[in-house]
Image (spheres, rainbow, N blue to C red):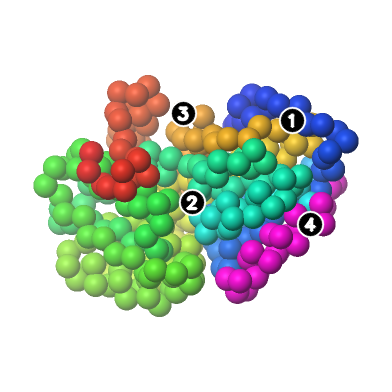
Amino acid sequence: MRIGMVRLFLVLISVFVLNANAFTFKPAVVYDINGKFDRTFSEDVYLNGVRRFQADFDIAVEQQEPQLRYALKAGLESLAAKGYGPIVTVGYRTALLVEEIADDYPDAFFITIDQSVDKPNVRSLVFAEQEGSYLVGALAAMLTETDTIGFIGGMPTPPIKRFECGYQQGANAIKNDIKVLKSMIGTEAAAFNEPEKGRQLATKQIKRGADVIYTASGRSAIGVFSAAHFKGIHAIGADSNQNWIDGELILTAMLKHAGIAVYDVWVNAMNGYWQSGTTIMNLKNGGIGWVRGADNQPILPKKYRKTLQEIEQAIKEGKIQVHDYSKNRSCSV
C-alpha cells in the first residue's frame, strides 16, 4: 500500500525540474520543541520519512530538535545558510517561522507540514484532518452508551481545530443530539507534552458522562489513555497507530501519513523535481487514513468497520462534504 501512495505523491509533486547548478540535495528536518519521539505526528515523520529515506538511499538527513522556542528560528536559519535543503519543518508553529525567513534565503527550499506558506521556495503539505476525524466521530457516536463523547486537543491551532470540528460533524451525522465535550490542554506548544493535564481533563469529561474520548494531543495523549483505562471507557488516538499502548482500550486512530509524504517530496527533490505551492493530503489521495487491522480487530466489530468504510467512500466521492475549519475559523457546517 505504501508503494502505491508513494507513486501517487510522485505524480502530484513531480512537476518542476530544478536547476541542477542552483540546487544541492542535502535533506534536513527541524522538529518542534517537543522533539521527534512524541508517539504521534513527529515520530511518524521520523520513522516513515527520515529513517526510511536514510535506509533506502544511504543519504544522511540532518535533524534538529530545538528545546526552546527561540532556537527553532535560529536552527532553521542556520540550516538554510549552510545550504541544506529541502528542509522539512514539522508542525504548525515551525511553518510560521518558515514564512518569516523564506524570503531571506531564496536559494533554500523548505517543506512545511500543517500550514500553507505561499512562497516560491516552499512546498506545503496540509492534511485534511477533518475527514479522518469525521470517521472516528461517527464511530464514537455509534458506540457511545451515554450519548456523550469527548475530544481533547493539545492547543487550539488550525490543525487541532480541524480535528475537533470534523469529529463533531461525524458524530452529529449519526446522532444529531449527541453531546460532544471539548477541552484543550493549553495554549502553548508545551501542551503536547503534559500527560498529567491530559489525564485530569479526561477524568473530568468521564465524570460528565463521556464514554468515548478522542485525543489529538501528542504525548499528552498518554494521560488521556491512562484515565480512560482506569475508568473503563474507550479512547481514539490520532496521527499514528497507538493501539500498541492498550489493545483493549484504543478503538482506532486517525492517521496522518506525514512521514510518507515527506519521503516522497525528498525523492522528487533528489531526482531534480520540485514544485512550490500547497498539496492537500486527504482520504482520496491516501494522505489521511484510520487504523483497521489486526491491532484493533478484537474491539472494533465488523459491522462498524463496514459502516466506516462506506462513509469513507462517500467522502472520497464527494457525497459527504466535511467542513474545513481553516476556511472560516468556525465549526459551523
| Distance from Cα at disc 2 to Cα at disc 1 | 28 Å
Say which of 214 and 27 sits in front: 27
* Quadrant of the image occupied by residue 306: top left
Q: Which residue is mark 4?
A: 81
Q: Which residue is mark 3?
A: 284
SS for callout 2:
strand
For disc 1, the neighbor class at 10 Å (few under 14, some 14 to 19, many from 20) is some
Q: Amino acid at mark 4?
A: Ala
Q: Which residue is mark 1?
A: 273
Q: Are marks 4 and 3 in contact (CB under 8 Å)?
A: no
Say which of 232 and 196 sits in front: 196
Q: Amino acid at mark 1?
A: Tyr
Q: Is residue 118 depicted above or below 317 in this figure?
A: below
Q: Nearer the viewer, mark 2 or mark 4?
A: 4
For disc 3, the neighbor class at 10 Å (few under 14, some 14 to 19, many from 20) is some
Q: Earlier in the sequence, mark 1 or mark 4?
A: 4
Specify the segment rendered in magenta: 58-83
SS for callout 3:
loop
Q: Earlier in the sequence, mark 2 or mark 3?
A: 2
Name which residue lies at 40% across and 63% down: 155
